Structure formats: C-alpha cells, structure tokens
C-alpha cells in the first residue's frame, strides 16, 4: 500500500512529527511504502531545511512555506506571520497517487488534503492532535474563527464542515472525543489510536541512574520551564538537567540556578533513551499537553514521572499509582514531590513500566491496519 502522511513540520523537536515518524516506521516494517509531505520550516525556528530527505526508507518531501493561513483574506495575513505555515502539495499529491492519506493537525493543510482526496477518490484520515484545550489570544483567536467558519473563503469548506468529511478521525486522547462529537463528527467515524513509543524503549539495556531530575523536550513557554526553575530554588541540593531545543527569545527570559544545566537537544533514539536512564526522576511542568509521549517514554524506562495536571498528563498518569501529578504552576508542590521521592518509589515505577507497554507502536499500528 502507498501511504502519504501530511504534517506541518518534519524537522526539529515536534510531538506531531515524532508521531508521524514513529507510525511511518511501523508501516514500512509491514511492507508499505510511505511518503511524508511537510513544510520546509524547522519547528520552533524560522530556518528552512532541505527539500528532500530519506529516513529509514521514508521519503520526505518538504514544500515551500508561505507562512500564511489557508483561505484567510489578504488584508489579515500580515497579522499572522510566523504562525501555522501554509504549503501547497496539490501537484505532488496528484503525481504520487497514494492509496491512503493521513493528515495531521486540524489546520489548513488538512482541509486541502480532504478536498483533494475526495476529488481523487482516496481515503483520507485526520489526526487532529487534540487542539481543544488551547486558549488563544488575539490575533490567534481571530485566526481560529476564520479557520472554523470561513476557511478557503467559502463556509462550504470551513474547518467545521471539513472535519466531518474525513473517512475516520483518529483521536490520540480519550478526553478529546467529546469535543469531536460536539463539533458534529459521527461517533462511528472516531477511532482512538494514542501516541505510541517504539519497541526500543522496551528492549534497550538499562543503565543505573546517577543523576537526579530530567526535563526533556522543547524549551518553550508552553512547557512552563519557569515553574520548574522556581522549584529548583526550593531544593538547591538536587540537580536538574534540561535537555532540548530552545526558543531563543524564551531562553533569554529564564533565570537559571546553580543546580540547573541546559544541554543540547538529542535526536538519536538510543542516545535519548540513555539520557532518560541516567536520571532518577522525569518532570513535565507544562501549561497544557494533549497526549505527552515523552511521559510514556520515561515510564517505559521505569522512571518516576511527575507531571502537571494537564489534560494529557491526567490521562496517562494515575496519580500515586503510575506517577505523580501537581497543580499547574505550583512550584512548591512540585519541589515537595521531588524532594520526597528523590530516592524513588519502586511500586510506582514498576506500575509505570507495565502501563507504558500498552502504548507500544508495534501493537498500535494494528489499529491503523483495521481502519485501512
């Protein structure tokens, strides 16, 4: 089968791209041919990246980004520079003639994908990635309204109408399903396939942890690194490593303490697992999360995970059983949880490891095969 995956970014640290890459690798293992279309922008930066690349037999084509919203009137486009990117793939899709299209995020490129697929008689699946817990300020709230109601100039192809056209809508979380139903998606079209983790997380040999606390992910405002740094001041005898690509303007605002190190991002899977293994505790202090795969990765390695009470965090972690939760922004509660559990909690860690096995990609890919 010829499968096309469409995603906004295919370079840089991006949770959506991580899913696209992971599931694509599983499709390749099953003998399918996979192509990825994305913009030519690196996530979190304004950098352009090479137009073509092959990763583990996955053919990636990156198309020039215009940096504007699909269908938005020209007079408003300047307001939204730097926000979700627009890239045209009509010609490339028609030349490829895929059997199946999976488009990620409920953005302009997904509307374009479903309209083209309906013209060509191709099954098109949407993975919206649970955008429903985001509170947007001006001008993004205006952009969202345009997208939902007047995308592509005509209400006939607005976001809401397009959402109902997909062959299936794939929910990555259970908490987003009521939102999809509320938007008019037929319950028989909704399929739950969460983010997964590669089998290497279960097979790579573990090493004994010698470091204290790890945050691994994008260093950006949504991850609320400020709360983590405030917690570090409360427990100066405990050391923290922050690993990941940083948004430069955000990084400049952070006040680091002596017990904190910011390290370069790691993209190699084996090296990433090694870094997780080196630490006793994994912390995710985000303001919001849809379905944080990095929690599952840390759980699979038997780490004690501590997460803020985001929708995604609460769905993955059973508080006190498979991990620990703290109120969003409460740095004192976070500091207390780290201090109390710095020597670990074997029961919670073992439970976490068992829970993570439910999210193995080699098992989850079977759910895709069913709907194909």
Image (tube, grey):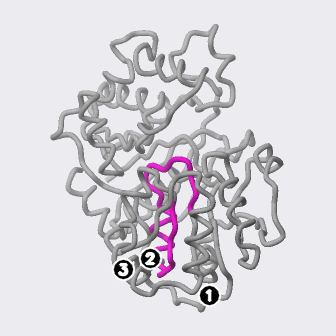
- The tag on residue 252 is none
119 in magenta: no
Q: Is residue 58 above or below residue 131?
A: below
299 in magenta: yes
Q: CA distance from mark 2 to mark 1?
A: 15 Å
Residue at 64%, 77% (x, y): give it. 275
- The tag on residue 351 is 3
Q: Nearer the viewer, mark 2 or mark 1?
A: 1
Residue 237 left/right relative to 28: right
Helix, strand or loop at mark 2: helix
Residue 55 location (% of width, % of height): 56, 61
Residue 257 left/right relative to 349: right
Residue at 41%, 46% (x, y): give it. 4
For marks 1 and 3, the one nearer the N-term is 1
The residue pinned by badge 1 equals 209
Q: CA distance from mark 2 to mark 3?
A: 10 Å
Disc 1 residue crowd, few under 14, some 14–19, many 20+, Cα 10 Å: some
Looking at the image, do the residues carrying marks 1 and 3 touch, with CB atoms under 8 Å apart?
A: no
- The tag on residue 300 is 2
For marks 2 and 1, the one nearer the N-term is 1
Q: Which residues are magenta?
A: 284-307
């Amino acid at each position: 089968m010829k499968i096309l995956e469409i995603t906004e970014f295919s370079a840089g640290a991006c949770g959506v791209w991580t899913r696209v890459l992971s599931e694509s690798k599983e499709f390749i293992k099953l003998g399918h041919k996979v192509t990825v279309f994305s913009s030519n922008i690196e996530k979190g930066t304004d950098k352009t990246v090479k137009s073509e690349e092959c990763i583990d037999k996955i053919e990636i084509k990156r198309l020039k980004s215009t940096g504007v919203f699909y269908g938005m009137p020209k007079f408003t486009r300047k307001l939204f520079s730097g926000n979700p990117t627009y890239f045209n793939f009509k010609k490339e899709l028609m030349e490829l003639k895929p059997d199946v299209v999976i488009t990620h995020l409920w953005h302009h490129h997904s509307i374009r994908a479903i309209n083209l697929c309906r013209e060509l008689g191709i099954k098109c699946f949407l993975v919206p990635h649970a955008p429903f817990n985001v509170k947007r300020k001006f001008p993004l709230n205006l952009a969202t309204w345009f997208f939902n109601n007047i995308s592509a100039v005509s209400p006939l192809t607005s976001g809401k109408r397009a959402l109902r056209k997909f062959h299936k809508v794939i929910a990555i979380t259970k908490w987003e399903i009521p939102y999809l139903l509320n938007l008019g998606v037929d319950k028989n079209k909704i399929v739950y396939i969460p983010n997964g983790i590669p089998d290497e997380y279960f097979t790579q040999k573990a090493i004994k942890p010698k470091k204290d606390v790890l945050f691994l992910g994008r260093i950006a405002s949504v991850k609320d690194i400020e709360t983590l740094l405030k917690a570090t001041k409360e427990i100066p005898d405990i050391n923290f490593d922050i690993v990941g690509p940083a948004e430069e303007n955000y990084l400049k605002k952070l006040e680091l303490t002596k017990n904190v190190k910011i390290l370069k991002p790691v993209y190699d899977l084996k090296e990433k697992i090694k870094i997780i293994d080196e630490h006793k505790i994994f912390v995710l202090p985000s303001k919001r999360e849809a379905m944080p795969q990095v929690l599952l990765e840390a759980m699979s390695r038997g780490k004690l995970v501590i997460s803020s009470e985001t929708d995604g965090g609460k769905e993955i972690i059973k508080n006190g059983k498979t991990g620990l939760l703290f109120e969003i922004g409460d740095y004192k509660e976070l500091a207390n949880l780290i201090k109390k559990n710095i020597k670990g909690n074997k029961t919670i860690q073992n439970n976490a490891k068992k829970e993570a096995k439910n999210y193995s990609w080699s098992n989850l890919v079977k759910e895709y095969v069913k709907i194909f």
